[in-house]
Amino acid sequence: MGKPSIFSREYEKRMKRRRRNAIIIFLAIILITSALSIKIAYNPIDYKNIKQNIQAWIDSDTNNSSEQTKAEKEETSDEKKDEEVVEEEPQKPVEEYINITLASGNIVKAIYVDDANAGKVFKTLDTNDSGVSYSISPSGKEIIVGDTNSIITLYNLDGTNKVISKDQYVSTSGSVFTKEATIQSNPKYLWNQNPKFISEDKIIFVTNRPYFGAGNLKKYVWMTDISNNEDKVIWDLAGANIEIGEKEEKGVKITVDGRVYFIDVNGNYIQ
């Protein structure tokens, strides 16, 4: 069927319908636009609320990520703890002992351990006798014991021993003073007391020697070289009361009538 002529009735009808439809659409657009304008005027859009909602959504996502990261860290930490628990603690050396029969006849226990690095080393001397004193060498391989009868003996880990104290004193004039006779005549006489290692081969101890008599004698610090068994008097360290302490950074601590000195590995002393 061909197009209607512009002069025909059919054409006029179509044009009227088009104009009517256009007017209706135009009016509808105006009505919708007017309605939206009125709604916005009386109910404005809350942009702040929209912004808050968007921020809340972002924060929620961030918190979820943080919680996930925290959970992963805690899981890793728990795994490390489990690994640490699995690791075995190094075993402490087992303490052993050897019985030592002192010159006085007393039997004491010399405690030692078998160290992984140093081997067997003395740790302490188990004795309840207050008259017995001892000192362990710097290497831990030897121990000296001052017995109740003023005898100083050196003991080794294999059980061998050697008496290093003297039982007599010979003066520069040749006079001989024995320990037994001296103590019999003066029971309070101090022949040897409190031996202490100052180095691997040198010890010090306190004595009333080289003076003898019945009066109140001074005490002196003596040094013995174990390697050659030679004795030496440290003349300046003399007093009514001498205490030999433990080894410190400066040396073995010596207190003479309240004055403190330190003796180094060579037998030299400083204040």
Image (spheres, rainbow, N blue to C red):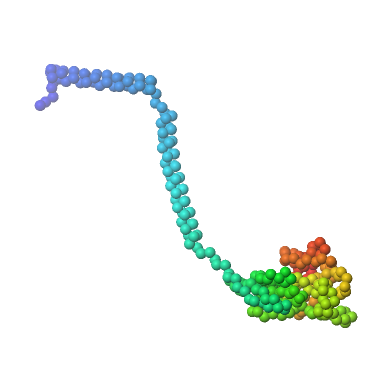
- For residue 181, above or below residue 77: below
Residue 229 in sight from this viewpoint:
yes
Q: Nearer the viewer, residue 251 or 174?
A: 174
| Residue 262 x, y percent position in the rendering | 77, 65
User: How many labels sit on residues?
Assistant: 0
Q: Residue furthest right?
A: 173
| As drawn, 239 above or below 165 | above
Which quadrant would the C terminus be assigned to in this image? bottom right
Kindly identify the residue that appears in the image at 69 percent across and 80 percent down: 161
Q: Quadrant of residue 193?
A: bottom right
Which residue is depicted at the point 60% across and 71% down? 95
- Residue 25 lies left or right of residue 36; in this view the side is left
Q: Position of residue 269 (x, y in %)?
A: 79, 67
Please name whichever residue, 72 or 113, is drawn nearer the observer in this view of the structure: 113
**12 and 255: which one is in front?**
255
The residue located at (79%, 71%) in the rendering is: 206
267 on left or right of 57: right
Report which quarter residue 170 is drawn in: bottom right
Question: Of residues 75 and 205, which is closer to you in this image?
Answer: 205
Q: Residue at x 82, y 72 (%)?
A: 188
The quadrant of the rendering that contains the N terminus is top left
Q: Give residue 111's position: percent from left, percent from top.
A: 64, 72
Vertical order, 40 against 61 (above or below): above
Can residue 199 be seen by looking at this rendering?
no
- For this view, does 63 lie left or right of residue 212? left
Measured as percent of width and height from the top left, residue 63 is found at 44, 42
Q: Quadrant of residue 186?
A: bottom right
